[in-house]
Amino acid sequence: MKEWKHSLTPGLVSIFLEFAKAVRDKGTNEIHLQTEVTLSKNGYNNFQKLRYFGLVAKVKDERDEPKAGCWLITRLGLQFLQGMSPAPKWVMTFRNRITEKSEELVFIDDIQRTFPRTWFQKEFEFNIFQGRLL
């Protein structure tokens, strides 16, 4: 068993941006990862790491059980996309549990300096609680 260090990299942020586009296009904050967003094999394999940073979470059903394959953008994830809140630069995990977080925080601009964010800064107004675009 090994403890793993995961960094919030440009590649991971690119995966998050593709997911956010799928949410915007669908108009609801519930996306089935395999059928409603197009990612590379690497993207699918690394997507779940975004939860360690608090950017995405599994969707739960009415019994509070995880819905298979369904994910949503968290409040922190939305604020991160909009450049309003930072996320930890790295996290350490052991058996899928966070054991340590970086005290250094990063904003999306620190990671994706060249990506034009206007589509989600201005157009991506999302009501997290109602689960739909405004």
Image: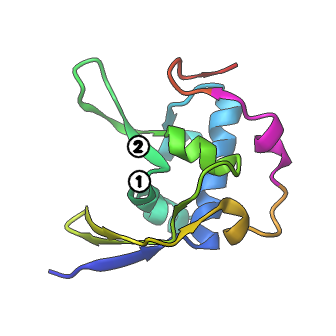
Residue visible at 62% across and 36% down?
23
Residue visible at 55% across and 46% down?
77
133 or 42, which lies in front?
133
Q: Amino acid at mark 2?
A: Ala
**Tag 2 secondary structure:** strand
66 or 36, which lies in front?
66
Give, as a single range, the part of the protein colored magenta: 117-126
Residue, disc 2: 57
Magenta stretch: includes residue 123: yes
Compared across the picture, whether 106 is left or right of 63 comes to: right
Residue visible at 59% across and 25% down?
28
Where is residue 90 shown, x and y percent of the image? 45, 73
Seen as rendered, the residue at the extreme front is 103
Compared across the picture, whether 38 is left or right of 74 comes to: right
Cα gap from disc 2 to disc 1, whole angstroms: 6 Å
Please tell me the numbered disc located at residue 51. Answer: 1
Q: How is the image coloured?
A: rainbow
Where is residue 78 shown, x and y percent of the image? 60, 42
Q: Is residue 18 visible?
A: no
On the image, which quarter does residue 5 sit in? bottom left
Where is residue 18 shown, x and y percent of the image? 66, 52
Magenta stretch: includes residue 105: no
- Above or below: residue 4 compared with residue 112: below
Whether pointer 2 and pointer 1 mark residues with C-beta atoms closer than 8 Å, the reply is yes
Q: Quadrant of the C terminus?
A: top right
**Tag 1 secondary structure:** helix
